[in-house]
């Protein structure tokens, strides 16, 4: 991860707590200048995100969308408005890299895939992990060969979760009853540049 020390990474995530649960490879690196943009969060999630930002001394922003992004109204333009607002936030940012969800949405989460697609259409220096959580949203046991061949070619780092850091962040979300993830944290992953 030393290659990214003193670099600016904009973390673009779908939901409050995704930056901890799925973005820990970047979030736990204090030598990286980090900023977090989250698209959707409950009132409690927004409070937890703000507290996390204060605790880590990083800028955090939550767009004003609550609930599932994939369920935003397409008829009245809310979904398109959210995508354009996120796109503008990314374009206006001055960062070396963007970190976002991988193309599978880690666990097949459609909102994660939406955010991934918006980020991929904005800037070419995208970082993502190969975190894959089987079950729930996807019937697959692993990331397919075609996805690996297409996306996971430029491996930048092997990452291990700092459990003390992860637990500290998770406790902030628990304190607001806003933790979204089920199960144990993913302990290791690879970070890729796309």
Image: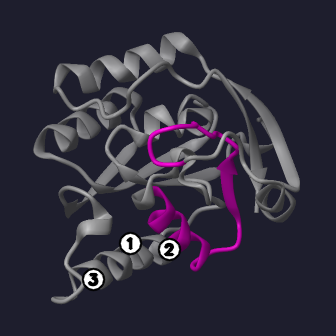
| Quadrant in the picture for the C terminus | bottom right
Residue at 62% across / 60% down in the picture?
Answer: 103
> Per the image, is 48 magenta?
no
Judge the density around disc 2: few (<14), some (14-19), many (≥20) Cα neighbours within 10 Å.
some
Residue 125 horizontal side relative to residue 15, left or right: right
Cβ–Cβ below 8 Å for labels 2 and 1? yes
Label 1 neighbourhood size at 10 Å, few (<14), some (14-19), many (20+)? Answer: many
**Which residues, given as a range, are shown in magenta?**
112-138
Q: Where does the image place residue 52, in percent across and percent down from the top left?
A: 32, 32
Q: Residue at x 66, y 51 (%)?
A: 128
In the figure, 83 relative to 64: above or below? below
User: What secondary structure is marked by label 2?
Assistant: helix
Looking at the image, residue 90 lies above or below residue 111: below
**Residue 116 covered by magenta stretch:** yes
* Residue occupied by mark 1: 86
- N-terminal of the pair, mark 1 or mark 3, is 3
- Could you tell which of marks 3 and 2 lies nearer the N-terminus? 3
Question: Does residue 169 lie above or below 105 as drawn?
Answer: above
Q: Position of residue 138 (x, y in %)?
A: 53, 48
**Relative height, residue 58 to residue 64 (above, below):** above
Q: Mark 3 = which residue?
A: 81
Q: Which mark is residue 43?
A: none
Observer-side mark, 2 or 1, equals 2
Q: Earlier in the sequence, mark 2 or mark 1?
A: 1
| Image coords of residue 180 (percent x, y) | 31, 34
Viewer-side residue, 140 vs 114: 140
Q: Position of residue 183 (x, y in %)?
A: 44, 21
């Amino acid at each position: 991860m030393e290659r990214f020390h003193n670099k600016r990474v904009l973390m673009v995530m779908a939901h409050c707590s995704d930056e901890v649960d799925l973005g820990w490879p970047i979030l736990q690196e204090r030598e990286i200048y980090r900023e977090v943009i989250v698209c959707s969060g409950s009132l409690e999630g927004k409070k937890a995100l703000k507290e996390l930002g204060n605790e880590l001394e990083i800028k955090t922003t939550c767009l004003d969308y609550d609930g599932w992004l994939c369920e935003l109204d397409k008829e009245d333009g809310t979904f398109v408005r959210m995508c354009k607002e996120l796109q503008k936030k990314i374009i206006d940012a001055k960062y070396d890299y963007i970190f976002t969800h991988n193309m599978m949405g880690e666990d097949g989460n459609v909102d994660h895939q939406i955010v991934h697609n918006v980020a991929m259409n904005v800037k070419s220096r995208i970082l993502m992990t190969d975190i894959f959580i089987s079950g729930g949203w996807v019937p697959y046991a692993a990331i397919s060969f075609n996805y690996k061949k297409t996306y996971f070619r430029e491996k930048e780092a092997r990452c291990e979760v700092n459990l003390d850091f992860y637990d500290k962040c998770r406790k902030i979300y628990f304190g607001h009853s806003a933790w979204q993830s089920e199960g144990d944290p993913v302990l290791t992953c690879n970070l890729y540049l796309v």
